Amino acid sequence: MKHLFFSALLGIILFSANLFAQTQSVTYQGIAINAEGQRLTNHTISLRLSVLDGSASGTAVYVETQSVTTSATGTYTVQIGQGNVVSGTFASINWMANNHFLKIAMDPVGGTNYAIISISQLLVSAHATSANLWQCGSSITINHIAGAVAPISKLATYGTVTNIPGETSKCWITSNLGADHQATAVNDGTEASAGWYWQFNRKQGYKHDGTTLTPAWTNTWINENSDWLTANDPCTSELGAGWRLPTSTEWSNVYASGNWNEWSGPWNSGLKLHAAGYLFFGDGSLYSRGSFGYYWSSSQGNSYYGWYLNVDSGLSYMNYDYKASGFSVRCLRD
């Protein structure tokens, strides 16, 4: 079945009522983005929102649908618990009795042809009077859809971590964007752990299975005076509002605070950075998977070069390279 030409992205989820009282609704704020990475502005979409019990594949204890029109910037806000009820009773959910997950599905044309966008755990503190339902340290599940950003369609789950020395307030994913899972070792040379690769300030991601590159490599040189623009940031496009690439300063702070001299430092950190290799700027050929890791920042060096973090067995350092090179992406949010 061919569907999901558009994607809705995880944004901010907040309780809108006292947790010790009967919770009547949850505020969900998101962004609607099409397959070309463009925001759907002033556009009517349909959402199906499900609260799952116990796990990301658990039974839906509450399901509702809503129709909403996005803003001039593509954002939208809904009150979960106040939509058209399909099943369950929102006010009767016992948030403290079990883990709960929010599954979001969307029809970008406002109909009922819903497709899953994301599944994320809802974490609630028993001592809070109001709280973020999603907290750093829990996982996020994203339904990547092949298009102008993701090279293929697949469901991926990303762990998250905070309190990383040098940038303790930031929340990071613990595997590369596009990876099936976290690497199993610093020299893990598998495609499943490597994830996808991006050229600097370009939305399109690339998958290399060791033999075949997807999609075809068409851009062999980049000469532009620009940092990585938010509109082209694959972290924002794929993970949702607030997620972004690290700046060179943020990478430098983490590198310096961790005293990373070679790859054991980044690997033994909470980020679990490994040697995912890179794609050669000339033709997209794969090199050094299992031997070297290159992680883009959002900061340019000049019109030809972008800053990145290098990870290998002999050295770990900040450097810059051709913007047309294909490097790994690790996302964070404030």
Image (spheres, rainbow, N blue to C red):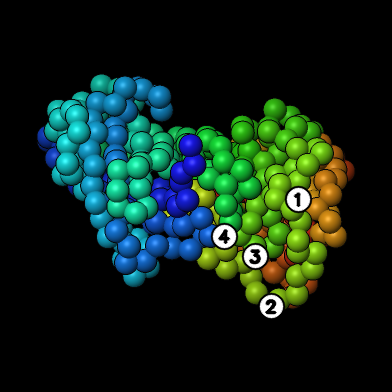
- Residue receiving disc 2: 225
In the picture provided, is 215 more to the left or to the right than 89? Answer: right
In the figure, residue 119 lies in which quadrant? top left
- The mark lying in front, picked from 1 and 4, is 4
* Amino acid type of the residue tagged 4 in the rendering: Asp
Q: CA distance from mark 3 to mark 4?
A: 7 Å
Q: CA distance from mark 1 to mark 4?
A: 17 Å
- Residue receiving disc 1: 294
* Numbered label attached to residue 233: 4
Rendering coords of residue 220 (x, y %) = 80, 64
Query: Which of the pair 85/142 is nearer the observer?
Result: 85
Rendering coords of residue 328 (x, y %) = 70, 49
**Mark 4 and mark 2 in contact (Cβ < 8 Å)?**
no
Vertical arrangement, residue 98 with respect to residue 148, above or below: above
Vertical arrangement, residue 118 with respect to residue 29, above or below: above
Q: Neighbour class for label 2 at 10 Å: few (<14), some, many (≥20)?
A: few
- The mark lying in front, picked from 1 and 3, is 3
* Amino acid type of the residue tagged 3 in the rendering: Asn
Between disc 2 and disc 4, whose residue precedes?
A: 2
* Amino acid type of the residue tagged 2 in the rendering: Asn
Q: How many marks?
A: 4
Between disc 3 and disc 4, whose residue precedes?
A: 3
* Numbered label attached to residue 201: 3
**Mark 1 and mark 2 in contact (Cβ < 8 Å)?**
no
Query: Which of the pair 241/135 is nearer the observer?
Result: 241
Rendering coords of residue 1 (x, y %) = 48, 37
